[in-house]
Amino acid sequence: MELNLDSRSSIEVSSLCFKDALHLAVGLSNGYILLYDIRSSQPYLTKTHNFGLPITRLEFASNQEVVLSMDGRALKIWNEHNGQPFTSIEPGSDLNDFTHYQNSGIFFANDPKIKQYFIPALGPAPKWCSHLESISEELEIDNNSNVYDDFKFVTRTQMDEFGLQHLIGTNAARAYMHGYFIEMKSYTKARGQNKLSAVEEYRERKLKEKLEKERQVSFVKRTTSVILTKVNRELASRLQSDVSLIEESGESSKMNNSSNYLLTDQRFSGLFNDPDFEIVEDSEQYKQLAPLMKKLEVKKKKNE
């Protein structure tokens, strides 16, 4: 690392700490730390925080041969001989100061609240908080834990769903907690078969729903005109009979379409709901149209 430390440079010394009578650490305003042996004019190690912030606090942990350095963002711990990182703490707020409890793994940091940290690798816990040792032992990772790379965990309910009950009690299914570890090949095969059966069930269910819906729609079409008709019930009944007969015969005609339009189209709803459109067979107007109606019926019978 190259540092411009001539008289014209704006870099300043922001912190200083002695390890012993011969060795010291110098923190600079640009985030660099220089380790010196006073018998030499050149630093024997240069370290940086990479944040560009002034180094505000330095301390040697001689029992572990590490250096604790702090700027406004992070507290870093690294080897004093080669600069290899040991650990780093970034609390997410501005760090003001820290204090390391000598010959232990405990230190306090102010950010601005005072927080306590315990790093067992730096040293044991003091007598006044020896309970931290037992806590740290419980948090240690067990390196001898079982690894099931080629197995899949399946609950008892899933075993029943996939039809894998026959594997229980064999080497292919290893009991664990509330389920079993089974071989991935067996699981993949059973899952594929279960998906196929699920797809078939889904299709059957959808087909039944569609048929039921069509029945309901057909029933509504056949009954709506009769139930909702307020006037001209005889006309509605006659039209509905025509539609039903043609639907049962499986034929389609213009007469069927026109009858459907009259019964279902909202534009003709007044014909069956509005009293002003009621057909009065005893009226003069109806008697005048009677001959024409007879001719239409004769023509209709001929077409049939």
Image (tube, rainbow, N blue to C red):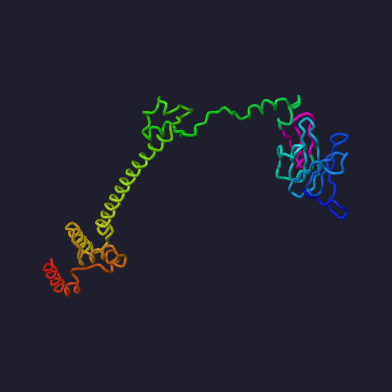
Residue 274 at x, y percent in the picture: 30, 66
Q: Is residue 183 above or below residue 224?
A: above
Q: Is residue 152 above or below residue 32?
A: above
Q: Quadrant of residue 239?
A: bottom left
Residue 230 at x, y percent in the picture: 27, 61
Closer to us: 88 or 204? 88
Closer to us: 199 or 54? 54
Residue 120 among magenta residues: no
Magenta segment main secondary structure: strand
Closer to us: 27 or 288? 27
Q: Is residue 289 above or below residue 70?
A: below
The C terminus: image quadrant: bottom left
The residue depicted at 28 percent of the width and 55 percent of the height is 217
Residue 285 at x, y percent in the picture: 20, 74
Q: Quadrant of residue 135?
A: top right
Number of labelled discs? 0
The residue depicted at 85 percent of the width and 49 percent of the height is 12
**Left or right, 111 with reference to 262:** right
The residue depicted at 43 percent of the width and 35 percent of the height is 184
Residue 116 among magenta residues: yes
Q: Quadrant of residue 101?
A: top right
Give the extent of the magenta segment. Answer: 98-118
**Left or right, 296 with reference to 207:** left
**Left or right, 222 with reference to 86:** left
